Image (cartoon, grey):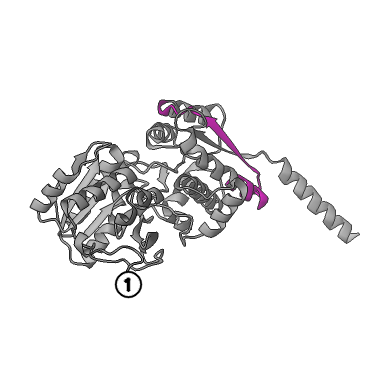
Amino acid sequence: MKRVAALLCALLAMGAAAAEPAIVIGASLAQSGMLADLAADYRKALLLWQDEVNAAGGLLGRRVELRLVDDRSEAQAAGRIYERLIDEDKADLLLGPFGVAASLGAAAAAERAQRVLINATGAARILHKPGTRYVFQVPAPFSVYGEGVLAMARATGLRTLFVVARDDPASREMAAGLRDAGRAQGMSVGEPVLFTTGLSDFVPLVERARAAGAEAWIAFGDARSAAEMVKSFKRAGYAPALVAAQGAEEPRFVDLVGQDAEEVIGLSAYEARFATPGNAAFAQAFAAKWSSAPSLTAAQGYAAAKVLERAVRQAATLDQEKLRAALATLETGTPLGAYKIDPATGVQRAAQVAVVQIQGGRREIVWPATLAGATWRSPYPRWEARTLLGSKGK
C-alpha cells in the first residue's frame, strides 16, 4: 500500500508540473526579407536549445516556449515588437533580435519596461551605455576584435602599427578599439585609414604604411578586401613583419589568393572546432538536427539562451530584479567562450576573438593558447624568400 501511495503522489506531482503554464521567451527575428538567410541559424540554434531544455525538465519545473516574431528584416520594427511581447504577450523572458540595428530598438524597449534582455548578436558599444541596467551582452564587443593581434605584436617587439578599416560602423569600431588599446600599451598607432567597399588597389595605402615605417599592417573588413590587400602587397613588394586582415580567416580567402595567403592572420569570433565549454556537444547536436555546421550566428543564439538558462537557475525565479542581479554576477562558459560582464554597462568582458593564420594552406588557430592548435609563424615572409608549397627540400 505504501508503494502504491508513493506512486500516486509521484503521478500527481508530475501532473501538477505538467499543468503549470509554460515559460514564454520572446524574441524578434528576421524570418523573411533580406536578412532572413543570415538570421536563419540564430532561429535554428534557439529551437535546438528549446528541445534540449525541455527534454531536461524545462526551467523551474515548467516547459519553455519560444515566441519568435518575424520582424521582416525591418530593424525599426524591433522596438514595437518587444513592446508587444512585454505588454500584450506577457513574455516572461526576452532574447535579443538579430543585428545591431534591431537590437537598439529592443534594448530601448527593455530598459523602459525594466525587463531583462539578453543581447545575443549586438556587438556594438552603442548598445551598452553607462547606466544600462537590463541589457546583457553575450558576444565579444567589436572593440576587442584586435586584442589577439596586439598580443602578438607586443610579444615580438613590434611597436609601429598601420591600421586600415572598411568604412562601415563595425569595422570602424574594431579599428578604434585597437588604436586605443595599442596606444595604452605604448605603441605607435596612427588614426585608422578608411577605405571604401570594393576597393581593389591598396598600393597607395601601402606607400603610406611604408612612409610611416609601419612594422605591422592590421586591417578590418572582409575576405575580398583582405585578398585585394595581399595582391597589392605582392605588386608593391611589401612585407611588414606582421600582416593581419579580418576576412583572412574565411575559407574563401585562400580560394581568392591561393598560395599568397600563406602566413596572413585573420580574426574569428567562432569556429565549430573551438575548445570552448559545451561547444563540441553543441556543434554535434546542431549538425545532427539541421545537417550543417553551426555558424557564428548559431553560436551566438545558443550561447545567449544558455546564459539566460543559467541565470534563471541561479536566481531560482523569474523576478526581473533578481534575474538582473544574477546576470550581473554570473560567470560561465559558452560555445563562444567565457561570459562575464561589466555590471555598470552590461558589456561582455571575457569573450575572446581567436586569431587564425594560414599555414600550409590550412586555417590554423594560433591565439589564444586555450584554443590554439598551432604555433604562430613570424615574421611575415618577404616575397622574394617564399617557396611554393610542397617544394621545400627539392
**Residue, x 39% and y 65% (percent of image)?**
372
- With 200 as the anchor, is 252 left or right in this view? right
Side of 289 relative to 112 (left or right): right
Q: Amino acid at mark 1?
A: Lys
Q: Secondary structure at mark 1?
A: loop
Residue that sits furthest to the front in the current view:
394
Of residues 67 and 37, the one nearer the viewer is 37
Q: Is residue 26 above or below residue 294?
A: above
Q: Is residue 192 visible?
A: no
Circle 1 sits on which residue? 394
Quadrant where the N terminus is found in the figure: bottom right
Residue 41 position in % (x across, y down): 51, 42
Q: Which percent across, then down, holds residue 322?
A: 49, 47
Residue 57 falls inside the magenta stretch: yes
Range covered by the magenta-colored residues: 49-76
- Residue 203 part of the magenta segment: no
Question: Label 1 neighbourhood size at 10 Å, few (<14), some (14-19), many (20+)?
Answer: few
Residue occupying the point 35% across, 49% down: 253
Q: Nearer the viewer, residue 285 or 119?
A: 285
Q: Position of residue 86 (x, y in %)?
A: 51, 31
Residue in view at x 37 percent, y 46 percent: 346
